[in-house]
Image (tube, grey):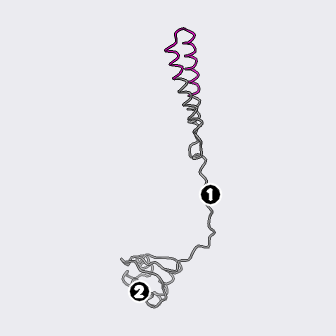
C-alpha cells in the first residue's frame, strides 16, 4: 500500500493530477480508496491541500509559479479601431446641406439663371456628399 501512496504523491505533486477519478484509474484503485489515501496523507502532513466537498478533486496548496517569463501586453488599440471618421462625417453632412441649399434655390428660383445655380449647387453637394460617404466606406475592417 505504501507503493500506491508514493505513486499517488508523485501523480499529485509532480504531474499535477487533481481529479480523484483519474488518480483512481492510474492507481487501479476505487475512488473511495484514493480519497482515503489522500486523507491519510493530509493527516500525516506529507500532502498539503484541500479535498473538494464532493471529494471529486484534490487541490494542493503549494502551487508552483511558472518559470516562464511574463509576456508584456501591448495595450494600444488595433489600427481598425483608431479610425477617425469625424472629418468624413463632416464632409458628408456638408454635402447634404449643399444639396438642400441647391434644392431650395432651384425650387424658389425666379429665372433660369437662379435655377441653374441651384442645379449646380445640387450637383456639387452630391459630389461632396459622395466623397464623404466614400471616405467613411474606406474604414479599414478587421482581418
Q: Is residue 23 magenta?
A: no
Q: Which image quadrant is residue 137 in? A: top right
Residue 82: percent from left, percent from top: 59, 46
Relative horizontal placement of residue 41, taking residue 138 as reference (left or right): left
Provide the residue designation for mark 2: 39
Residue shown at 58%/15% (left/top)? Answer: 117
Residues rendered magenta in the picture: 100-129
In the rendered image, residue 89, in percent from the top left (x then y), is placed at 56, 35
In this orientation, does residue 47 appear? yes
Instruction: Name the secondary structure under disc 1.
Output: loop
Quadrant of the snapshot with the N terminus: bottom left
Q: Where residue 84 appears, x then y in whole percent?
A: 59, 42
* 60 and 100: which is toward the camera: 100
Q: Residue at x 59, y 29 (%)?
A: 131
Residue 49, x across and y down, in percent: 46, 81
Q: Which residue is mark 1?
A: 74
Q: Taken as a whole, is the magenta stretch helix, strand or loop?
A: helix
Q: Looking at the image, which residue is at 36% across and 83% down?
A: 32
The image shows residue 26, relative to residue 138, as above or below, that is: below
Judging depth in this view, the residue of 25 and 49 nearest the camera is 49
Amino acid at each position: 500500500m505504501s507503493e500506491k501512496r508514493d505513486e499517488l504523491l508523485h501523480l499529485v505533486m509532480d504531474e499535477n493530477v487533481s481529479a480523484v477519478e483519474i488518480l483512481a484509474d492510474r492507481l487501479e484503485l476505487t475512488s473511495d480508496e484514493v480519497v482515503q489515501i489522500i486523507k491519510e496523507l493530509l493527516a500525516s502532513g506529507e500532502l498539503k491541500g484541500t479535498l473538494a466537498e464532493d471529494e471529486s478533486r484534490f487541490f494542493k496548496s503549494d502551487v508552483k509559479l511558472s518559470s516562464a517569463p511574463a509576456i508584456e501586453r501591448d495595450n494600444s488599440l488595433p489600427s481598425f479601431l483608431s479610425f477617425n471618421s469625424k472629418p468624413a462625417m463632416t464632409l458628408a453632412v456638408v454635402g447634404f446641406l449643399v444639396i438642400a441649399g441647391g434644392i431650395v434655390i432651384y425650387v424658389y428660383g425666379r429665372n433660369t439663371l437662379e435655377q441653374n445655380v441651384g442645379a449646380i449647387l445640387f450637383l456639387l453637394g452630391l459630389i461632396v456628399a459622395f466623397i464623404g460617404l466614400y471616405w467613411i466606406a474606406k474604414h479599414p475592417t478587421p482581418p
